Amino acid sequence: MATTAIQLEYPYHFSAVLSRDADAVAPRLATPVFRGAFDWHSAVHGHWTLARALRLCPDAPWAARVRTLLAMQLTDAKLAAEEAFLRAPGREGFERPYGLAWLLQLVAEFRTQGDEASAHWRNALAPLESIASTRLLAWLEKLPWPVRSGEHSQSAFALGLFFDWARDAGKPDLCARIAERVVRLYGADRDAPVRYEPSAHDFLSPLLAEADLLRRAMPREEFGEWLARFLPAPADADLGRWLTPARTPDRADGKFAHLDGLNLSRAWMLQGVVSALDATHAHAAVLHDAAARHRDAGLEGARSTHYAGSHWLGTFATYLVTERGLS
C-alpha cells in the first residue's frame, strides 16, 4: 500500500499556512518528497513503512523496487525543498507534533541500517531531523497541559515517538529531559475516565497513549503503582467495555476509518503497557488479552481497500506487527 500511496499526488489534504499567492502551488512543487498519501504526515510515515520493511526484509522480492523508489524520493534537491518549505514564515507549527514525530522515526529507521544508501539518506534528512527535534522540544517545554485528543494533535503518542528517537540517537540527556517533563504533565493523573472513550473519530486512545508514554518515562515499579491508580479495577464493567475493540460504521469515510487505526494503536499501546508490568500485576492479564483482541480486529480492518484507510493503515499495521514501540 505504501509504495502506491506515496506516489499518488491526488487527492491531497494541504494544511499549511499560505503567506502569499506564490505559496498556492501543487503538492509536488511545495513538498516534493512528502507530496502523496493524501497528506504530509501520511507520506512521511509511508516512507518510514518502506524503510522499516526494507531493513527487516532486505532480500524480499520487492526490496529492489523499494530501494529504487526511496532513491527517487529522497534526493538532496527534493529534501532541500522540504527544508525550505518547513522554514517558510508561518510554518513553525506545521505538523506539530504528529508529522514531526513521524519524521524522526523515519530518520531513526535509517540510523539502524548499515548500508551506504541508508547512511546517505540519513545525512540528507539531517536538516529536517534538526527542525523536527528542535520544534518538538520547544513545544514540549512550553506545554502547560497535555493535549488529550484522539487525533493528530495528541501529545502523548507523539512524545513517545520523540522519546524513542532520542533513545535510538544516543541522547540520554534528552531522554531524561523528555521523561521529566512527561512525568510533570501526566504523573499525577488517576481515575482515568474510561467511560468517555472512544470518540467516534479517534485513531489514538488518549488514555492508553498516556500509559504507554509513562512506561517509558517511569521506573518499572513506579509505573506499575501509577497504573493501578489510573485504571479501574480489572473486573470493573467500564474497564471491560473500554477494552472492547471498536467497529467502524463506514470504511469509505475518512474519519470513521480512524477507528480501524484505533484498534491497531490500542493493540501496540496495550502491548507496551503490559511489557512494563510484572506478570503478577492486577491488570497484566486483562490488558494482555485485550491486546490480542485489538490486534486481530485492527489487522482485519487494515485490509480495507478504501483509500480513506489504505493510505495510512499499512503504517499502523507495520508498527504493530514489527513491535516498533517495544524495540
Image (cartoon, rainbow, N blue to C red):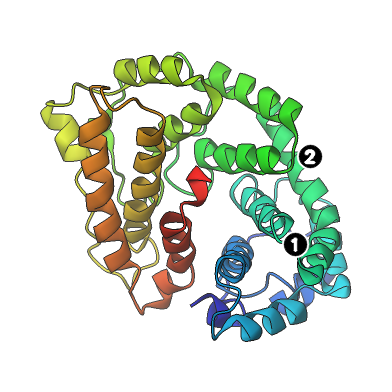
Relative placement, left or right, of 270 versus 38 is left
Q: Is residue 88 visible?
A: no
Label 1 neighbourhood size at 10 Å, few (<14), some (14-19), many (20+)?
few
**Observer able to see residue 136:** yes
Expressed as whole percent of the image width and height from the top left, the position of residue 88 reads 84, 56
Residue 239 against residue 228 in the figure, above or below: below
Q: How many marks?
A: 2
Task: Give me the disc on residue 114.
Answer: 1
Residue 134 shows which numbered tag? Answer: 2
Q: CA distance from mark 1 to mark 2?
A: 26 Å
- Which residue appears at 22% of the width and 58% of the height? 247
Few, some or many residues within 10 Å of mark 2 (<14, 14–19, 20+): few
- Residue 82 in the image, given as x and y percentages of width and height: 80, 64
Of residues 15 and 299, which is closer to you in this image? 299
Report helix, strand or loop for mark 2.
helix
Which of the 4 image quadrants contains residue 43?
bottom right
Vertical placement of residue 155 versus 226, above or below: below
Answer with mark 1 or mark 2, whichever residue precedes in sequence.
Answer: 1
Dividing the picture into quadrants, the one containing residue 223 is top left
- Residue drawn at x 47%, y 28% is 215
Residue 69: mark in rendering = none
Circle 1: residue type: Gly
Residue at (42% x, 16% y) in the render:
221
Mark 1: secondary structure: loop
Disc 1 vs disc 2: which is toward the camera?
Answer: 1
Q: Amino acid at mark 2?
A: Thr
Q: Which residue occupies the foreground of this view, 134 or 69?
A: 69
Q: Residue at x 60, y 60 (%)?
A: 41
Q: Are marks 1 and 2 in contact (CB under 8 Å)?
A: no
Taking the image as shown, residue 201 lies to the left or right of residue 76, namely left
Indicate the position of residue 313 as horizontal and vertical percent values.
43, 65
Q: Position of residue 228 (x, y in %)?
A: 30, 18
